[in-house]
Amino acid sequence: MKDSHYMVVNNARRAVALPEPRDLLRQFTASRPFRGRLLTAAAVAICTTLPGVVRADPSPDGRVVEVPFVPDSGSLAIYCGKLIDGLTTTAHGPTTVVVRNGRIESLVAGRSAPQAVSSLDLGEATCLPGLIDMHTHLTDRPGDTADLSVYYRRTMEEQLAIARENARATLLAGFTAARDVGTYVGWADRALRDEINAGRVVGPRMQAAGFYLTVPGGGGDLVIPGHPESGIPPQVRMGVARGPEEFRRKAELAVAGGADLLKVIASGAVLAYGGVPGAPEMTPDEIAAVVEVAHRHGLKVAAHAHGARSIREAILAGADTIEHASLIDDEAIELARQHDVALSMDVYNGDYIDKEGREQGWPEEFLRKNLETTEAQRQGFEKAHAAGVPIVYGTDAAVYPHGLNARQFTRMVQRGMTPMQAIQSATSVAAKYMGWADRIGAVAPGRFGDLVAVQCDPLEDISCLERVDVVVKGGLVFRQGTQAASPH
Ligand SMILES: [Zn+2]
């Protein structure tokens, strides 16, 4: 075999030598019932997405390595039977979305076949922008909540192995962008983000917080009863601080390390020992110190706040989004509206925690606090939405399995949103509060070619977003039909 050859193992586990990556496409499409033609880069992206489909080796020694793909390099004309663009409140009829070099170039009514661009025929489907989850913990998973001390022992590499699976499940579920609002093993989310951006790992576009900014023993500080504090490794306590000056220093550390947003734990947490969700943990001055650093560097602040007082204090201190907002009151709702602060309310996961968390043996304290906040949060959601407060789609995935992110849509519609409003909360509204309205959140010229398609009408039945059929990110097809790993 010559140096230029690629070694490919296809689905049938048959090894074949190919002269160049372009031939991966022919090999791949010949063996699979693709409706559309795909460019080389797209084929490579799909190949790396599908288990066991392709591994390739540019070296002659028979060593098998995975083919990297170039992110955001796809050029594709996607013909959609119906299009929800994320911005306008009514759906468009048949439309061709032209993506060149990863970005949306134009939207053309009807079917169009631009030159030098492969096409994907989704004439039977509804297309919508790639979905955005504003509150995830991509490095963590629910199975570890029963014994959080695993984070004391885990290496970065072990954490990343879990993170990569989560990232892949998230993208294949149609979430082409996500904020990671904290990881116990400090900076694990940044490492994951960098691997995705380099094309080595399949996952959503990410904003990473790096670590939690939290008071000693607070909701982001992993102090577990019965474990001596001296035995806690420093990487799980990177953001623990007391007083505005110390918080300012930790915030600067996060910014310098490459965080995309800062996450403060303003109030007690549900899934942490000893915390009281309704009670403040950080002072207004401490929150304001973090906000000052973040805004000076052009970053947003996500404030974890369950209780009404913490919500009010975080809004007045300048936070950009309030996470959970479970026990929000009328005054805090009015304040959020006046200050145009968005709420990221995880109104689905209470169901999962109560059922699965109980079966998995999660601490009794966590289960009790979950029950105390679940219904109150849903009522607060109804009120806040009715009052006109912006609401972004945030699920707290990791509390429940990654890849099931879309389950929350149904709850949001049950609690007062129209399906279109729920979709916009996970597209254009989310993009605005990420500071990424110029690049994601809508199927519109200039934005990334991030798009999903479903074989049903989400405006009739919002739960159909749980069955995403096609996922395109940066013009590259990552999922088409059942030909991708199902969420775990
Ligand atoms: Zn969270």
Image (cartoon, rainbow, N blue to C red):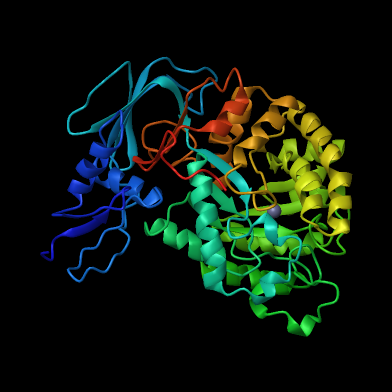
Residue in the foreground of this view, choosing between 92 and 329: 92
Residue in the foreground of this view, choosing between 153 and 417: 153
Camera sees residue 291: no
Most distant residue in the bottom direction: 230
Camera sees residue 58: yes
Figure label count? 0
Dividing the picture into quadrants, the one containing residue 244 is: bottom right
Dividing the picture into quadrants, the one containing residue 473 is: top left
Residue drawn at (34%, 40%) of the image: 475
Picture layout, residue 482 above or below residue 324: above
Q: Is residue 329 left or right of residue 382?
A: right
Picture layout, residue 153 above or below residue 342: below
Residue 67 in the image: state x and y as whole percent: 30, 58
Most distant residue in the left direction: 2
Q: Is residue 335 left or right of residue 318?
A: right
Q: Is residue 127 left or right of residue 428?
A: left
Picture layout, residue 398 above or below residue 225: above
Placement of the N terminus among the 4 image quadrants: bottom left
Residue 299 in the image: state x and y as whole percent: 56, 56
Residue 218 in the image: state x and y as whole percent: 80, 66
Residue 447 in the image: state x and y as whole percent: 40, 38
Q: In this view, does 101 lie to the left or right of 474?
A: left
Residue in the foreground of this view, choosing between 1 and 21: 1
Residue drawn at (47%, 45%) of the image: 485
Dividing the picture into quadrants, the one containing residue 184 is: bottom right
Residue drawn at (55%, 61%) of the image: 162
